[in-house]
Image (spheres, grey):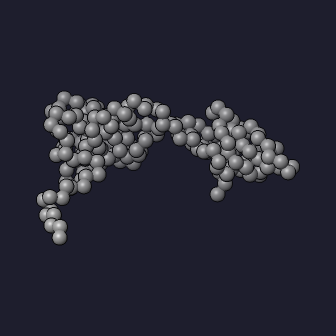
Amino acid sequence: MSEIPTAAAIPPIVPIESPASGAVGQVRWFVGYTKPREEARAQENLMRQGFECHLPLIRTQKRTKGMLAWRLEPLFPRYLFLRPASGAAPMDRVRSTLGMTGLVRFAGLPATVAQAVIEELKALGEEFRQALFKPGNSVRLADGPLAGLEGIFERADGDARAIVLLEFLSREHRVSVPMESVTAVG
């Protein structure tokens, strides 16, 4: 018969990391929680107070006013990474900073992320790209001579055009159409 472990013997489950879990001397970044769509404002205000901040961004394709455009958006909406740049900036300032809600906490302790994770995010830079349509998505043409036809999105042909696989006249045809005339089905 095996012995039942006591609560002290069971290691705690910590989703990110707690300050107590890090090795002494390792650089840790705190995870900040921002107000909706105020990540850039929070980052700017934290940097003015002496914090080093990192806000990973992703390039996404959005339809605005009928046109497709690439925009930069936060990779993790409402979250950013921060640490005191001088090592002496008090963390209690974070909650009262414009654009911030506070620090992410687990069991009352601020969540931290290792320096290596932040370095990987910085190394990727803006390589994160998210297109509005992915290959294989069902699409419909909204205007032009082929308006109303449904097909399969194959790929983007630059930023302005799309290659769509359409079936008409009993055959499959690859057509290049303006990206703004392509809409999602469903």
71 sits left or right of 96 in the view? right
Q: Is residue 14 visible?
A: yes
Q: Is residue 49 visible?
A: no
**What residue is drawn where x is 32% and y is 47%?**
33
Q: Position of residue 36 (x, y in %)?
A: 39, 48
In the image, residue 68 sits, relative to residue 141, either above or below, namely above
Report which quarter residue 44 is drawn in. top left
Residue found farthest to the front: 1
Foreground pick, 71 / 163 = 163
**What residue is drawn where x is 73% and y is 49%?**
151
167 sits left or right of 4 in the view? right
Number of numbered discs: 0
Image quarter in which the C terminus is found? bottom right
Q: Position of residue 185 (x, y in %)?
A: 66, 54
**What residue is drawn where x is 19% and y is 55%?**
11
94 sits left or right of 135 in the view? left
Image quarter in which the N terminus is found? bottom left
Residue found farthest to the bottom: 1
Foreground pick, 126 / 143 = 126
**What residue is drawn where x is 29% and y is 44%?**
32
Foreground pick, 91 / 125 = 125
Foreground pick, 90 / 45 = 90
Q: Position of residue 80 (x, y in %)?
A: 34, 41
Q: Position of residue 111 (x, y in %)?
A: 25, 47
19 sits left or right of 181 in the view? left
